[in-house]
Amino acid sequence: MKKSTKLFASAVAAVALLISTNVSAQKIGFGANLGIPTDGAYSFAAGIDARIQFDVTKQLSVPVATGYTNFFAKDRSYFNGAAIVDVPDYGYIPVKTGLKYFLDPTGSGVYAMAEVGAAFGVTDNAKTTFLYAPTIGYSWSNGLDLGLKYENTGKGDALRLVDDKNRTGQIALRIAYGFKL
């Protein structure tokens, strides 16, 4: 699938999701992510996201999120044991959902969250893969949210062409602000 087709399909899916769920959505948030890749071929990762959160109870919510994340190549070359390979940056659009559970009955404070979905690769030789992201965080009643997550997209990057490691993950800090609708 061409990069432009993936971008268009992802954008249409995200807009359709936002339009169809906005009526009953209870919170919407926007965040920035800074991460340390778990693979030595990348130096750091950065991204932005938008999240709609449906409260099932005060303690349990269902988040639906999308955005953009980019892994920045460290040296632009990678030695896989046989040859030196050019390493491009790896960018993807995550589309994910999951469960968010607050430890405090008020629906703020410490939470644990687990998300699954797809990472739509948008850079050269990137592909669409399964994505999972466990998170721990703290949410203040004023809307500020701070989370620490591990996000893994498996073999979605271009380096999958030269070796078979399940490599592309990050440990990321997410800072966000949410609004009640």
Image (spheres, grey):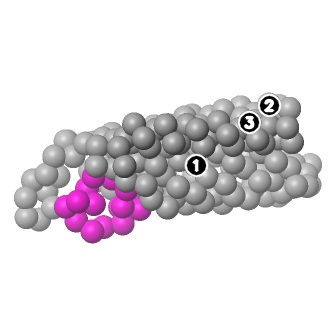
**Which range of residues does the magenta coloring cover?**
154-167
Magenta segment includes 26: no
> Relative to 34, does residue 151 appear above or below in the rendering?
below
Asked which quadrant contains residue 117, the reply is: bottom right
Q: Could you say where residue 115 lies in the image, as x and y percent from the top left?
A: 63, 58
- Residue at (53, 47) in percent of width and height: 94
Look at the picture and state if 88 lies above or below 158. Answer: above
**Circle nearer the N terminus (2, 3):** 3
Query: Tag 3: Cα neighbours inside 10 Å, few (<14), some, or many (≥20)?
Result: few
**Principal SS element in the magenta part?**
loop
The number of discs equals: 3
Amino acid found under the numbered disc labelled 2: Phe
Residue 141 in the figure: left or right of residue 117? right
Which residue sits at x=46%, y=38%? 7
Please rate how many residues cluster around mark 2, counting C-alpha atoms within 10 Å: few if below 14, some from 14 to 19, many from 20.
some
**Relative side of 33 to 147, left or right:** left
Residue drawn at 51 percent across, 42 percent down: 9
> Amino acid type of disc 3?
Ile
Label drawn at residue 95: 1
Residue 142: horizontal and vertical position, in percent?
83, 31
> Which residue is denoted by mark 3 in the rendering?
19
The answer to which of marks 1 and 2 sits earlier in the sequence is: 1
Residue 179: image tag:
2
**Which mark is in front, 1 or 3?**
3
- CB atoms at circles 1 and 3 under 8 Å apart? no
Real-space Cα separation, disc 1 to disc 2, in angstroms: 20 Å
